[in-house]
Image (cartoon, rainbow, N blue to C red):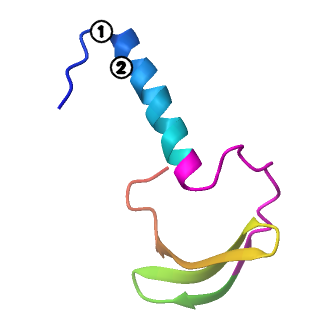
Amino acid sequence: MPEYRSLRLWQERATALREEILFSAGLLPLPKKTPLNAQVFGKIVHEDYTIEKVILETFPGFFLGGNLYRPVGNYGYR
């Protein structure tokens, strides 16, 4: 593993790595940000938690779906 003797050297390497990763993923230049158009629906209620379906439009015409698990009650969170 390379050793970086200063923060500046590491930051330069980190910038180069970030650009290589974005290029490899086909994300350079970065696409413009668009609204996510989030939809939350289909709530299922259990004793200790709820589950809701979530859809996000990550890129126009491309959707990401998932489940959102939420505890029921406060559980010390404010």
The residue that disc 1 covers is 6
User: Toward the viewer: 43 or 53?
Assistant: 53
> x, y (%) of residue 39?
74, 75
Q: Is residue 9 left or right of residue 18?
A: left
| Main secondary structure type of the part rendered in magenta | loop
Q: Amino acid at mark 1?
A: Ser
Tell me, yes or no, whether the two marked residues, 2 and 1, touch with CB atoms within 8 Å.
yes
Residue at image coords 81%, 75%: 61
For label 1, count other residues whose C-alpha is less than 10 Å away and answer few (under 14), some (14-19) or many (20+).
Answer: few
The answer to whether residue 41 is magenta is no
Image quadrant assignment for residue 71: bottom left
In magenta, the rendered stretch is 23-40
> x, y (%) of residue 72?
47, 74
For label 2, count other residues whose C-alpha is less than 10 Å away and answer few (under 14), some (14-19) or many (20+).
Answer: some
- When the figure is inspected, residue 24 is found, relative to residue 14, above or below; the finding is below
The residue that disc 2 covers is 10
Image quadrant assignment for residue 56: bottom right
Q: Amino acid at mark 2?
A: Trp
